[in-house]
């Protein structure tokens, strides 16, 4: 099997693609490795590729005129990003940066559009991906506008549980390494505020915190604090008895 086809098959969206379409993508795709803290694209760069992350971690960052940094999204291996080029974005509006050494497949927009025209399943999957990410950003914006620092962090922890939660003996591990500064950048507060609120949540027995490691000890209590429902979690994360609503 050609190396790039193997790479492309790591993308969950490529499950929708036929072998012939996968070969077309492979012929045009290019693999590149970015060092830690290097830039993948900048605001105003042409949006002429979509990207598949193979190894490492990438973050999407917006910087205000005052120089404040907001993390819009974090991408893990298997994630597609830069997808707004497929719905009319001609130039980038954010920075994409390699948080760690990262290997990426760049797929020309024209090639991806050609495959999407042939494959309704892929088009639907990408449309759902864009919609999901938009809803997540809108929810985070509402939190920024209307919620306290504690409420913002609790809502973020719930979001991270939904995406990265892994059951372990102590509770539910948020299986992504994030510093307090990373968490602060995701919710628009200071690192000191994140440290303070995490300390409060740990004192209350809601979480245990280690070095870039957070374990949620009670999903029911976190759901109640975040004004969410346990039923919105993936099935493997839901506690055995979920008959009584938590919200």
Image (cartoon, helix red, strand yellow):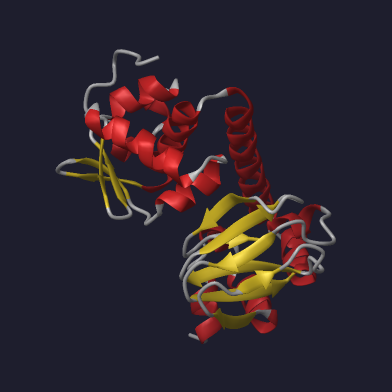
Percent of width and height locating residue 187: 54, 40
Asked if residue 4 can be seen in this view, the reply is yes
Placement of the C terminus among the 4 image quadrants: top left
Percent of width and height locating residue 67: 69, 54
The answer to whether residue 169 is above or below residue 75 is above
Q: Is residue 199 left or right of residue 35?
A: left
Asked if residue 20 can be seen in this view, the reply is no
**Number of numbered discs visible in the structure rendering:** 0
Q: Quarter of the image holding residue 179? A: bottom left
Q: Residue at x 51, y 43 (%)?
A: 190
Name the foreground residue: 128 vs 196. Answer: 196
Q: Quarter of the image holding residue 21? A: bottom right
Q: Residue at x 37, y 20 (%)?
A: 224
Name the foreground residue: 160 vs 120. Answer: 160
Q: Residue at x 77, y 56 (%)?
A: 93
In the image, farthest residue toward the left = 169
Q: Residue at x 65, y 72 (%)?
A: 40
Name the foreground residue: 147 vs 192. Answer: 192
Percent of width and height locating residue 161: 38, 40
Name the foreground residue: 246 vs 17. Answer: 246
The answer to whether residue 96 is above or below residue 128 is below
Q: Quarter of the image holding residue 30? A: bottom right
The answer to whether residue 51 is above or below residue 184 is below
Percent of width and height locating residue 139: 59, 32
The answer to whether residue 206 is above or below residue 136 is above
In the image, farthest residue toward the bottom = 2
Q: Is residue 97 left or right of residue 88?
A: left
């Amino acid at each position: 099997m050609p190396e790039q086809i193997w790479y492309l098959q790591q993308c969950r969206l490529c499950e929708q693609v036929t072998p012939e379409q996968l070969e077309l993508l492979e012929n045009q795709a290019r693999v590149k490795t970015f060092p830690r803290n290097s830039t993948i694209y900048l605001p105003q760069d042409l949006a002429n590729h979509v990207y598949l992350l193979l190894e490492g971690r990438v973050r999407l960052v917006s910087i205000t005129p005052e120089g404040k940094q907001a993390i819009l999204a974090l991408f893990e291996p298997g994630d597609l990003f830069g997808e707004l080029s497929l719905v009319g974005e001609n130039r980038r509006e954010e920075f994409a940066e390699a948080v760690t050494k990262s290997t990426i497949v760049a797929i020309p927009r024209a090639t991806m559009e050609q495959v999407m025209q042939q494959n309704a399943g892929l088009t639907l999957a990408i449309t759902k991906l864009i919609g999901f990410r938009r809803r997540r950003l809108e929810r985070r914006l509402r939190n920024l506008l209307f919620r306290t620092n504690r409420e913002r962090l609790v809502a973020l922890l719930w979001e991270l549980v939904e995406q990265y939660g892994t059951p372990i003996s102590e509770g539910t591990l948020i299986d992504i390494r994030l510093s307090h500064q990373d968490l602060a950048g995701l919710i628009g507060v200071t690192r000191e505020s994140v440290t303070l609120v995490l300390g409060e949540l740990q004192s209350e027995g809601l979480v245990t915190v280690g070095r870039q490691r957070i374990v949620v000890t009670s999903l029911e209590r976190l759901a109640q604090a975040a004004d969410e429902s346990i039923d919105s979690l993936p099935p493997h994360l839901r506690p055995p008895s979920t008959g009584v609503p938590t919200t």
